[in-house]
Image (cartoon, rainbow, N blue to C red):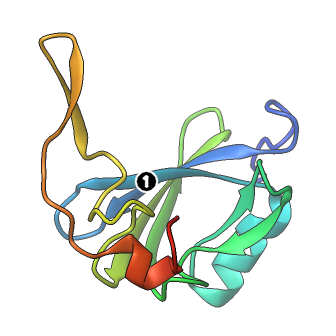
Amino acid sequence: MKLDFEKSNGLITAVVQDHLSGRVLMVGYMNEEAFRRTVETGFTTFYSRSRRKLWVKGESSGHRLVVKEISTDCDHDALLVKVEAAGAGVCHEGYESCFFRRLEDGEWKVSETQTYDPKAVYGGGA
């Protein structure tokens, strides 16, 4: 079975979920090479739209995502990647998940505490 990378200009959306808790940790994008490397290495590899290059999640922080299971949707243009997170958090802002803000009374509010100091991990900020 092939994935449909052409529908969105060579990329597919990859929703990353903790394999035990079910919590969504982040959303990234993969091109064909990133998907292939993810399958081959067992570590999530994404395509950075801003940097226009591949990157392995955790390559600078050490907070890698170990792949446990990969599923695709009915259109074959999105992935659900269940992972075991190795590290204090996934978000480059220092949180367990990139989804740490909630809409409350029309404003985005931080809804949890940081799990690590991003300045200590990334040196001067993310």
The picture places residue 15, in percent across and down from the top left corner, at 47, 50
Can residue 17 be seen at all in this image of the molecule?
yes
Spot the residue most to the top: 106
Q: Quadrant of the N terminus?
A: bottom right
Q: Nearer the viewer, residue 74 or 120?
A: 120
The picture places residue 78, in percent across and down from the top left corner, at 60, 42
Please tell me in which quadrant of the rendered image residue 54 appears. bottom right
Please tell me in which quadrant of the rendered image residue 101 appears. top left
Residue beneath disc 1: 26
Residue drawn 50% across the image and 56% down it: 71
Q: Nearer the viewer, residue 109 or 49?
A: 109
Residue drawn 76% across the image and 72% down it: 36
Query: What amino acid is at disc 1?
Result: Met
Tell whether 82 sits left or right of 51. Answer: left
Compared to residue 113, the image places residue 79 above or below, namely above
Query: Within 10 Å of the Cα at label 1, are there few (<14), some (14-19), or many (20+) other Cα atoms?
Result: some
The local secondary structure at tag 1 comes to strand
The picture places residue 67, in percent across and down from the top left corner, at 47, 77
Tell whether 53 sits left or right of 114. Answer: right
Compared to residue 98, the image places residue 4 above or below, namely above
Can residue 64 be seen at all in this image of the molecule?
no
Q: Nearer the viewer, residue 63 or 45?
A: 63
Tell whether 98 sits left or right of 114. Answer: right
Residue drawn 37% across the image and 52% down it: 98
Tell whether 50 sits left or right of 93. Answer: right
Residue drawn 39% across the image and 59% down it: 93
